[in-house]
Image (cartoon, rainbow, N blue to C red):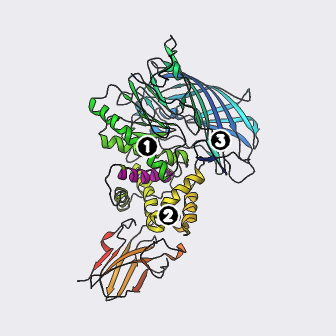
Amino acid sequence: MKKIILGLSLLSVISCASTNATNNHGVKVPVKKSASQNYWQQHVDYTMDIDMNVKTYQYKGIQKLVYTNNSPDVLNKVFYHLYFNAFQPNSQMDIRSRNIKDPDKRVGDRISKLSPSEIGFIKVGSLKQNGSAVKYETVGTILEVTLNEAIQPGESVTFDMIFDAQVPTQIRRSGRNNKEGVALSMAQWYPKMAEYDFEGWHTPPYLGREFHGVWGDFNVTLHIDKNYVVGGSGYVQNPQEVGHGYEDKTAALNIPSGKKLTWKFKAPNVHDFTWAADPEYIHDTFKMDNGIDLHFLYKNTLSDFYKENWKKVQPKTAELMTYFSKYIGQYPYKQYSVIQGGDGGMEYAMCTLITGKRKFGSLFGVTAHEMAHTWFQFLLATNESKHSWMDEGFTTYISNKAENEISGRNKENPHSGSYRGYNYVVTSKLEEPLSTHADRFHTNTAYSIASYSKGNIFLSQLEYIIGKENVAKTLKKYFTDFSFKHPAPNDIKRTAEKVSGIHLDWYLNEWTQTTHTIDYGVKSVNGKEITLERIGQMPMPIDIAVVYTDGSKEAFNIPLRMMRGEKPTKATIIEDWTFAHPTYTFTSSKTVRSVEIDPSKLMADINQKNNSFIQE
């Protein structure tokens, strides 16, 4: 039976940044800069030793964390996330799930019913700053630490922690014994330093949504029952000792005779570390021509039907890796792992956890989406809690395009499902602005459609505004300028402006900070004269397809004045339309038979019925 992942030393990349250097894979990565310069980000180095008891699902941890304050600020406190504490009766995650109108079925009221042996927890036993004990208090899923000595700008300090933890019953993302029998899905499992950036500390309680983390290097030692296969973030440092498919087949294994194996991992320049383990994992390795190893871990107890799908998805995963590297930016690590586990599909550092009992189309689709998250939000590390649309939406955009091409579907608009979802949330009056914090949406429906569908449309509709080619260039420049950083909404907007030369502040504001809708209509056609009207509150440039009575056709483009420019187009560009004017009239060269607004259907017009006119 084959087992865990990784093996190979990766690139050397340094976190923090404003300028870029090129690593040994030809990828531009941030170079550390001083706190006095405009862009800064904090840095962490984790060294952890974990002893796991697979019978009690409890583990003991020793953590050494070197924290570097690259900010211009003096820090008197620091904060850690203790995510597993959410899986306890009466936690905020429990209460939120039992009170929201449309709870996630995976959660429901399950947390409220957990027994003491089924809950999750992380209990800090001791914490020292540079060798001296510090005061700390556990408040739900946050550890509040009052420092003995403030951390000065540019200073690095060492925190030594001892903690005990228990893996909860699988409910959301993390846990033990998921519905497919995977023993350990270990995400958000360790005390994790909270992010501090130009906005201050980011310490939201864990209610089941998304994450934000500090870039750094992880050295993790895991002691676990020798029958367990492990896979996850980073690279196995002792493959000859653990075997399970990681070892060099030409060298002899050196497996200890005790009941536990010691796994040693290194994960350089990541902002999280995840692993999964099960005694029944099959471990397959698919080697790409560019030197990247793809690892697949799935249970040997799956039926032959599901196992065959896991075999078939391996070359397709390589095609996905190639697609995303080509159209966004080169994947900078030497391994990626697709692991059966979790409760659906969720992205992590250099890996994903997905449920495995899927038809091939579903397995391919979820792999495409979760792998795309490597770029959005892993390498382009947006604050998912505040800007989930940049995470889920951009991932949906690029994975839709990748699936469409690789599967050979060749849909004219691979994002049509997102447009339908957006129209639903508008007509049902459930919509909330994209700028809403992920935990604050009134309904899960509003969150999901906003983040996945409307976030996707931000980019697909941008193709309509600035042109498909300019959006493609924008994504590449966005990756070049902001990978290994924490980009915010203004960063994608400014990147698109620099590429296209078009002003887009209005677009970012209207689409992400309001619930204004787009609704344009053909008001009248009189001979050669065409009058259009803006009914919705959100302005847009307008593409029009005109058919004349003699059968000839002509395309027109009406720029929006506040764009201060127009997209590259073969259409006839006519006078721009201001926001203040509710109607727009122009005269064509011939008598008109029919008019259609936006034949591409990339504009998210909520009422398509008034978008066309045919002269009787």
Q: Residues within 10 Å of mark 2 (few under 14, many from 20)?
A: many
Give the residue displayed 59% in from the left and 52% down from the top.
482
| Badge count | 3
Query: Residue 14: which numbered mark, if any?
Result: 3
Label 2 vs 3, first from the N-terminus:
3
Image quadrant occupied by the N terminus: top left
**Separation of disc 2 and disc 3 at Cα?**
30 Å
Q: Residues within 10 Å of mark 1 (few under 14, many from 20)?
A: many
Residue 41 shown left or right of residue 351 in the figure: right
Is residue 435 located in the magenta-colored stretch of the structure? Answer: no
Relative vertical location of residue 510 with respect to residue 289 in this rendering, above or below: below
**Separation of disc 3 and disc 1 at Cα?**
25 Å
Q: Secondary structure at mark 3?
A: loop
Residue 548 position within the rendered picture, expressed as x and y whole percent measured from the top left: 30, 83
Q: Secondary structure at mark 1?
A: helix
Which amino acid, mark 1?
Answer: Glu
Label 3 vs 1, first from the N-terminus:
3
- Residue labelled with disc 1: 370
- Residue labelled with disc 2: 470
Is residue 383 located in the magenta-colored stretch of the structure? Answer: yes
> Can residue 346 be seen from the camera position used here?
yes
Give the residue displayed 35% in from the left and 52% down from the top.
404
Does the magenta stretch mainly form a helix, a strand or a loop?
Answer: helix
**Separation of disc 2 and disc 1 at Cα?**
25 Å
> Can residue 514 be seen from the camera position used here?
no
* Along the line of sight, the residue nearer the viewer: 166 or 223: 223
Give the residue displayed 51% in from the left and 60% down from the top.
473
In this rendering, the label closer to the viewer, 3 or 1? 3
Q: Which residues are magenta?
A: 382-405
Which amino acid, mark 3?
Answer: Ile
Residue 457 position within the rendered picture, expressed as x and y whole percent measured from the top left: 43, 59
